[in-house]
Image (tube, rainbow, N blue to C red):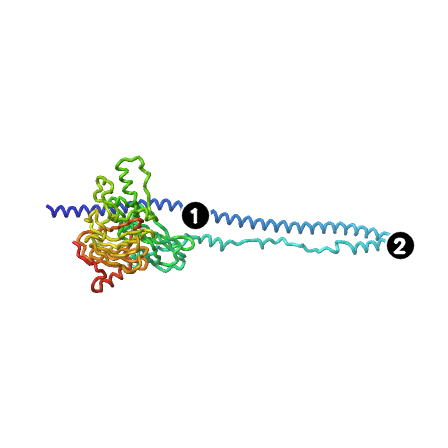
Amino acid sequence: MDTQKEALQRIITTLANKNDEIQNFIDTLSHVLKGVQGNSAKVLSDLDEEFDGLYSVLDEMKESMTNRIKQEQAHKTQELQNQLSQCTNALESSEELLEFASRTMDIKEPEEFTKAARQIKDRVTMAAAFRLSLKPKVSDNMTYLMVDFSQERQTIQGLKFLPVPKAPEIDPADCIVADNCVTVSWQMPEEDNKIDHYVLEYRKTNYDGLPRVKDERCWETVDDIKGTEYTLSGLKFDSKYMNFRVRACNKAVAGEYSDPVTLETKALIFGLDNTSSHLNLKVEDSYVEWDPMGGKSQESKVKGKENKGSGHVTLKNNPSATPSPKRTSVTSRPPVSRGSRDRFTGESYTVLGDTTIESGQHYWEVKAQKDCKSYSVGVTYKTIGKFDQLGKTNTSWCLHVNNWLQTTFAAKHNNKAKALEVAVPDKIGVYCDFDGGQLSFYNSETKQLLHSFKTKFTQPVVPAFMAWCGGITLYTGLQVPSAVRTLQKAENGLSGSSSSLTSNAQ
């Protein structure tokens, strides 16, 4: 019976997964269908715009050429009319002189004849008819303004759709995911020297396999990539996977996207558990800050005082106004409200992470305010008591920084401390290898090893933090840095431990 139930459960799970895949594919097909309709309308509109532009250019050219022909016609007409007018006037004058010369031939008296003949001679010398060019200044030829668009017509008739670059191909084996960076590499299926650049799109997702149309996150774009490789750096891996796709573009058109690939980018993501924090700690997202009025404010709420919003004060730069944690009276703590019995109290100014580590290798970082007087960073079993301080039990491990009177930097476990002879870094990286039983702390910038605990974790652990008179910021979604992995391999190859606080906590 149980075997049949298990088999049926596997069938149900398989069918559910397959149905989910089919539904995702149906969504994809619907999305593509809408894309066909929308993109078809766009390319038709673009085609009309291109042809309208071509018609406009042809109309402008025709108008310009027509104006040139009319200008040439007007010029030649004017020249010929001027020449015609001059010749007409010269002809009239010459005919009048001819008539005068004919009449002179009939004069009998020698003196009058001689006088008239001299006048005729003078008038002939000055006559316009003998100064005219009897050749048209312009010809009637207009063939030099003829056009032959046979080649252009052939070119236009040969117009085709632009050659579209083929879709690139992304090989997941050539892609690298490390140090919160992703390097995506692709290649063209065949050489194309017309490609000008590439466009890379990516988005985070929690689903493996093909991208989902109904995924909440939109694609982000990196444009104008000249090579066939691109590295996205400084990422926060707050999702398990990332989808990638790329397309090639020439000077005029973009090609189809490559088949999308999904790369695994998971890293430990957690926040601070406000329900576990000491009442004197103010927790917001990934930031915790000492709040000396936190307990009193809570007490005021419990007692129902009227000044509800009067008193949250965050002291960062005035240690004299803040009691030393060793002087804090446990008996003066406010009443604990129902459901908060697991809150840290007394001198344990502690807050836990909201995620349990039960296996694997994980990494996160912590940065303290410059004026923070005291803080601790480490891990603990969830069985830690609400009065217990980090590092003072055999179920918690931490680095402790004290800037109260003089700076001290120490590794703490089981109420033992080992002073660290190194400078306190601005940001501390925490590496937890649960299966390997190792907890190491690094300078996050230089990756210098600060300290390592070696133990055997017998229970799940949670990240743990202490802050007093100041605040600390938590950075998660980080992969184990390559430099840390390298250092871990080197350290594990050495005999013995770098810690004098090695233990086997139970």
Residue 460 in the image, given as x and y percentages of width and height: 19, 51
Specify few, some or many for label 1: CA neighbours under 10 Å numbering under 14, 14-19, or 20 or more: few
Tell me the distance, in whole angstroms, between the alpha carbons under discs 1 and 2. 94 Å
Query: Is residue 28 in view?
Result: no
Q: Which residue is mark 2?
A: 111
Q: Secondary structure at mark 1?
A: helix
Residue 402, image x, y percentages: 29, 54
Q: Which mark is residue 149?
A: none
N-terminal of the pair, mark 1 or mark 2, is 1
Q: Amino acid type of disc 2?
A: Glu
- Horizontal relation, residue 44 to residue 295: left or right: right
Front position among marks 1 and 2: 1
477 vs 421, nearest the viewer:
421
Instruction: Answer with left or right where residue 81 lies relative to residue 434.
Output: right
In front: 327, or 436?
327
Q: Is residue 120 left or right of residue 407?
A: right
Mark 2 surroundings within 10 Å by alpha-carbon count, few (fewer than 14), some (14 through 19), many (20 or more)? few
**Residue at 32%, 55% in the rendered image:** 426
Q: Which mark is residue 47?
A: 1
| Residue 448 picture quarter | bottom left
Q: Position of residue 138 (x, y in %)?
A: 65, 54
The answer to whether residue 174 is above or below residue 212 is: below
Question: Of residues 167 and 231, which is closer to you in this image?
Answer: 231
- Specify the amino acid type for callout 1: Leu
> Residue at the left extreme?
1
Residue toward you, 128 or 10 = 10
Residue 414, percent from left and from top? 20, 54
